Image: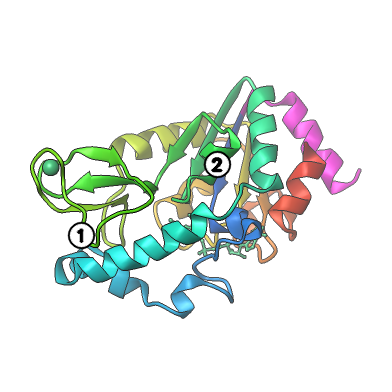
Amino acid sequence: MDQITAVCKRLAAAKSLTVLSGAGISAESGIPTFRGEEGLWNKHRAEDLATPEAFRRDPELVWAWYQWRRTLIAQKQPNAAHDALVSLERRLAAFTLITQNVDGLHERAGSRSMIELHGNIWRMRCTGCGLKTESEAALPALPSCASCHGLLRPDIVWFGEAVDPDHLIRSLNACRDADVMLVIGTSGVVQPAASFASVAKEAGAFIVEINPVPSLSNLADRVFAEKAAVLLPKIV
Ligand code: NAD
Ligand code: ZN
């Protein structure tokens, strides 16, 4: 039996599917990953930009970088891999998409049962009162809160920050409940997401990795060293 057929049989028998996606799923939309050859961090140091310390030191620089990324993302569209996950969500009784991406492309594609573990680049959070707002495309250099005038920051989990405990609990539950788990386009170095596949595996899930440079090594039951936008439509 070929590899794709084997995965399809698993999916056909599965009641619950959990997906973990990373920057690689948006690569074919033209959004740079962090750690690939074209990665953002080859040009910018993460520790200079995506940390609470960086924001305290130079909020204007951090906002300029996020504005640059937002402008880039606004010009891009969800790809066939994002669309394939929407089809799978419609077909499975229980489906959870855990994404490390902040680009909002899963939502634009139509995914609904979704946990945005690292936040969303289109949302802002007040450093004063905590109020969250959807942000307009155009922003002043230093946006401020309409309610308390505090400084707004991107609603993103930065290096050195903890993910929302509620998101973490829901993610772990989805991993434990999964019959099948797809791990797509993540280098698996950022915790806690990096351990989700082993949580699912220990609870009995069948693990499938899709990544031209696979990262799960021994953990995955099937590995497709292919681009997500090529492989996922074939499965669908
Ligand atoms: P990463 O950059 O560390 O790894 C990307 C992975 O995708 C690599 O393993 C690479 O081999 C793989 N990949 C590249 N092209 C692919 C393709 N066409 N199909 C499938 N896989 C492909 O990304 P990560 O593991 O998500 O790192 C986590 C951090 O990166 C998170 O904090 C996340 O918020 C952030 N990030 C998000 C975006 C986004 O929202 N689009 C972009 C860059 C980084
Ligand atoms: Zn406020």
Q: Which residues are drawn in magenta?
A: 1-16
Label 2 secondary element: helix
Q: What residue is pinned by disc 2?
A: 106
> What predominant SS class does the magenta segment belong to?
helix
* Disc 1 residue lies near ligand 2 with CB under 8 A: no
Q: What residue is pinned by disc 1?
A: 142
Q: Is residue 103 magenta?
A: no
Q: How many marks are shown on the rendered structure?
A: 2
Q: Residue at the spot x=79%, y=35% of the render?
A: 8
Q: Residue at the spot x=66%, y=66% of the render?
A: 213
**Position of residue 186 measured from the top left corner of the image (x, y, whole percent):** 55, 57
* Disc 2 residue lies near ligand 1 with CB under 8 A: no
Position above or below: 154 against 67: above
Q: Residue at the spot x=47%, y=55% of the render?
A: 194
- The residues bearing labels 1 and 2 have C-alpha atoms spaced at a distance of 28 Å
Q: Quadrant of residue 88?
A: top right
